[in-house]
Amino acid sequence: MSIQILSAQLANQIAAGEVVERPASIVKELVENSIDAGATKIDINIEQGGQKRITITDNGCGIVQDELALALSRHATSKITSIEDLAQIASLGFRGEALASISSVARLTLTSKPATQSEAWQVHCEGRDMDVIMNPAAHPDGSTVDVVDLFFNTPARRKFLKTHKTEFTHIDELIKRMALSHHEVAFKLTHNGKTIRQLPIQSIEKRIDAICGKGFISDCVAVERDYQGIKVTSWLTKPMVHRTQNDAQYTFVNGRMMRDKLINHAVRQAYEGLIDSQYYPGYVLFIEVPYTDVDVNVHPAKHEVRFVNSRVVHDFLYQSLVDALNRSFTDNPVVNYDELTVEHDYIQPLSRHTETTTYQQPRVQSAGLAKQAVANYGTLMQPLSVQCGANHVAEQPSSMQTQVLVLTQSLNQYDVLVQTDKLLLCDSQCIVAKYLQQQMSASETQQPLLLPIASAVKVDIDASSELLAQFTQSQLLVEHHVAGNHAQKWLLKKVPSLLRSLPWSRLFVDILEAAPLHTDDVYEQLALSLFAIDSQYPSIRALALHWFIGLTSSQQYHIIAQHIQPAQVQLCTKES
């Protein structure tokens, strides 16, 4: 087959597949054109969910008569003129495809009158032929675009449209987003002759309340920060007023509505540990970055952007939101949460780990294990009664050098034999706990986590101060924020540099759930939590035993004397 240039009509219909997905797509393109034209009032009239008719009227600058027909041509726009302009797009539209694509799948009429022109003119175009008809018309300053019979010439595309109610719901949601991003513009939305939404020019706070619900602003904490040309302005719902659905989450970049993954990830991280996973926060978030530092031409519908310094944007946004949410826990002099009575429970406890480790001492089995261990190593010993307990180990014997024999995993918790002139059974978890304590003490610096670990585990207020002191002693940088008796937030920000690789997201929650803890219980709780993680414990245990063997006899015995397990073993000489 020979290569040939596609006709303008076919090229426009191919482009329409990207631009015109449903009636809401047409409304988006036309309203954006009105905003770019400087309109302060936009009326949107919808019939039958937009399938029958879409009419957009504005009071913008209008289009002069000589350029009216050109506006319906593909790649015709006044927004950009050079490649340099493409690298710093300030307008909402810039491709020059919308009107041409719409007119290829519907009957389009464009009427416009600039303030400098004495009369209005109207152009009409429809279907594949793309013939433009121009006539004089009566119209005030501004423009009106009338789109009738969407997909009248492509019935296959029409079959994919949903019900009128569903299609109008998409249009209504779109207008809500555009009204939030441009509170200096008045909007009026009508469906089948009934006014659905009418928004005058108003402040951003009033516009947010009008869109998200009355009182939304009062339930939010405000954010306004800037850094290296990046500015964040946001309203975030406080954790105690979370929502059951994500119907109030709006994000904008340079006035353009977005569904960007990077931004959503930063917001989710900021709320992590504050609300249960089955609930959603509400927020209206505006990000302003230099036009040269963002690329908006990466998605056909312009719903995503690409930041030049994405890491900086993410971290700055995350830190800004976290600081604001933390203030919402402490800086609230109006409400006394201790005396607050509500008819519902805002904060749901985080789900506990399904893997629960119950530590049971195998007292009955210990003697048999000891005999098996002695038999395995072929040790010939005189009859000796050994009492393995803290009350029976008072001082370090000097008659024999300590030997550490590591038994197999089948021996359960009693998996280490420490042999002097007595045979002692020891749980390796006590050695792991001492090893972790030594590593924390030996860490000269604290390693910041890439993203702080957050948890909403409730700890008794009296025990929280002691727990914070233990964290500090263990080289853990932890912040604790409280909102009365209703919510707590714990943030783990830094860990000992020598133990950076531990699964702190799991261990941190386990420590909080085990509170209150005494001075050395933090290390023992770490060892116990590691024991429940099959993929982590063997390697940590091996490192701990290697460290233990390198200690002096006195140091080894001191550890065993503190953590010996209660057991009684009778050792007998082998029969010859």
Image (tube, rainbow, N blue to C red):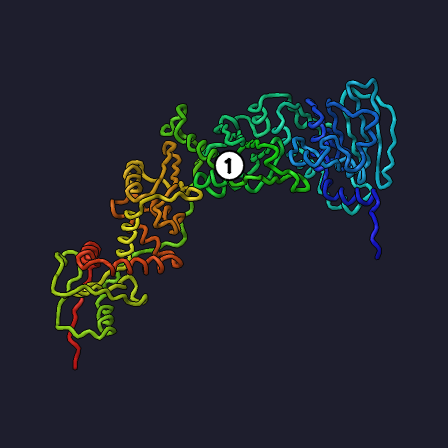
Q: Which corner quadrant of the image does residue 346 belong to?
A: top left
Q: Is residue 299 visible?
A: yes
Q: Residue at x 15, y 62 (%)?
A: 387
Instruction: Give the quadrant of residue 336.
Output: top left
Which image quarter holds the C terminus? bottom left
Tag 1, which secondary structure? loop
- Which residue is labeled 1 in the image? 281
Picture coordinates of residue 68 (x, y %)? 82, 28
Please give left or right for residue 416 compared with residue 53 in the image: left
397 up-or-down from 466: above or below: below
Q: Nearer the viewer, residue 167 or 559?
A: 559
- Residue at 48%, 43% in the rendered image: 277
Query: Is 256 in front, or is 83?
Result: 83
Viewer-proximal residue, 398 or 482?
Answer: 398
Q: Position of residue 14 (x, y in %)?
A: 77, 45
Left or right placement of residue 385 versus residue 100 in this view:
left
Tally the marks: 1
